[in-house]
Amino acid sequence: MKEKRDLKIQAIENGTVIDHITSGQALNVLRILGISSAFRATISFVMNASGARGRKDVVKIEGKELSVEEVNKIALISPKATINIIRDFQVVQKNNVVLPSYVEGVVRCKNSKCISNSSEPIESKFSVLQSEEGVSLHCLYCEHVISEDIAENLL
Ligand SMILES: [Zn+2]
């Protein structure tokens, strides 16, 4: 069984597997991790894989462990993701992402008149709420709500 599963996406020796990413969000996860054509490590990802809980995306990155900031951003766009740390081909740690209740300087407010978008050096501040519809961010300055397009507004 294990071999069959591994055919889908190659095993990595050391690094991170981000599993249960909300279907369609893998490219945004890569963006959060700052992965561009200049990135030298091996990266593989699967989009729309069928899992036990429906469709999901999976991202594997060789030789990288994620920072708290990166994990918090991933939680905003993919609150059911799991972060698996791989060492010597074994999962040594598996954690669900935890949705922060508050984020500062992470997302741009979509209200162009918001004080966080002014020339003042004021960091954006949002409270984070989760409902059945998904995650929504509520600006603490202007009360603007971002829900659908959090990924596009990440700083
Ligand atoms: Zn605002």
Image: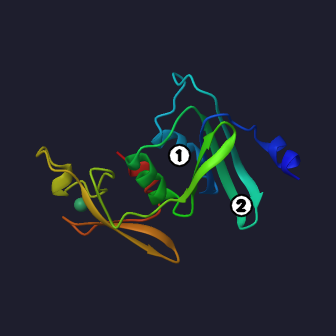
Front position in the image: 115 or 105: 105
In this rendering, would 7 be left or right of 39?
right
Percent position of residue 150, x then y: 43, 56
Please report the residue visible at 54 percent of the width from the left and 40 percent of the height from the top: 30
User: Which image quadrant shows ligand 1?
Assistant: bottom left
What amino acid does circle 1 point to?
Val
In this rendering, would 12 be left or right of 123?
right
Farthest-out residue, bottom: 132
The numbered mark, 2 or 1, whose residue comes first in the sequence reads 1
Q: Which residue is mark 2?
A: 55
Identify the element where label 1 is drawn. Answer: helix
Q: Which residue is mark 1?
A: 29
What amino acid does circle 2 point to?
Arg
Give neighbour class at mark 1: few <14, some 14-19, many 20+ (Cα, 10 Å).
many
- Ligand 1 is within 8 Å of the C-beta of the residue at disc 1: no
Please report the residue visible at 33 percent of the width from the left and 52 percent of the height from the top: 107
Please report the residue visible at 51 percent of the width from the left and 33 percent of the height from the top: 35
Query: As displayed, is residue 78 above or below residue 40?
Result: below
State the scheme by which the image is colored: rainbow
Asked if disc 2 and disc 1 are in contact, CB closer than 8 Å, the reply is no
In this rendering, would 143 be left or right of 92?
left
Front position in the image: 113 or 103: 103
